[in-house]
Each structure stands twice: as C-alpha cells, then as structure tokens.
Amino acid sequence: MPTYNKLVRDRIPEIIEKTGKKFSTKILDNTEYIKELKKKSFEELEEYVNTTNNEDAIEELADVLEIIHALADFHGASIERLEEVRKQKAEKRGSFLEKVFLIEVSE
C-alpha cells in the first residue's frame, strides 16, 4: 500500500472509498495543519512552474488558489479581505502586469 503522508482535499477519502480501496487518515491539529498547508503551497506552486501549456497552468493555479483560500481562512481572513490587501498593495507599489525586471540600483 502506497504511503502519502500529505494534506489532501477534503473529499479525497470519499473518492478513495468509492473505489473500494482501504486507507487511513487523521485530522491535523492547528500546528500540523499550517505546517502541511505551507508544504502543500510549495508542492502546488512547483506543479504550476513545471507546466508547459496554458490549460495545465490554469489547472495548477486553481490548486494554488485553493491553498491560498485555506491559508487566508486559517489566518482569520476572508478571500475578500485578502483581495482588499492585495489591491491596496497594488495601488501603493504596483502589480506585476508591466513586466518590470530590476537590474540594479546605484547609490
């Protein structure tokens, strides 16, 4: 039996059960949960980085966004609040849409 030891989406046990396979899970405490969410964020981002077409990229970005939703919730913020903060930062410092690449700064 393969061992995964990783955070999975809430319905994965139900999906596995429908295949007739056996599995084991546990519910994480908050310390374990945030640690695993952070690990999962890197996993999902790496999967996005390794995509080679737009369709796969969108699929992986949806996974990254799901992790962001969970992280925001864990930290007591709604996705709307997160979006407010993002907009404030974009107004103050800009976004990444103009593709600016900083080479160096001299004194």
Image (tube, grey):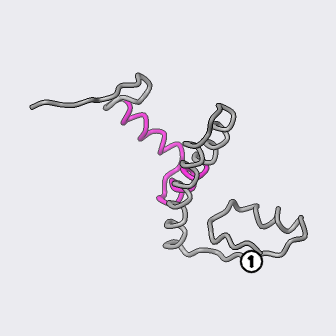
Q: Nearer the viewer, residue 82 or 4?
A: 4
- The answer to whether residue 73 is above or below residue 53 is below
Side (left or right) of 47 relative to 74: right
Q: Quadrant of the N terminus?
A: bottom right
Magenta span: chief secondary structure: helix
Q: Nearer the viewer, residue 1 or 20?
A: 1
Per the image, is 41 magenta? no
Q: Residue at x 58, y 51 (%)?
A: 44
Q: Quadrant of residue 33?
A: bottom right
- For the residue marked with disc 1, what is the amino acid? Ser
Q: Residue at x 54, y 48 (%)?
A: 45
What's the magenta region? 66-90
Per the image, is 86 magenta? yes
Side (left or right) of 24 relative to 70: right
Please state the horizontal and vertical placement of residue 24, each as a whole percent of the image.
74, 77
Question: Which residue is labeled 1 in the image?
Answer: 24
Please state the horizontal and vertical placement of residue 100, each as a whole percent of the image.
35, 25
Q: Nearer the viewer, residue 14 or 44?
A: 44
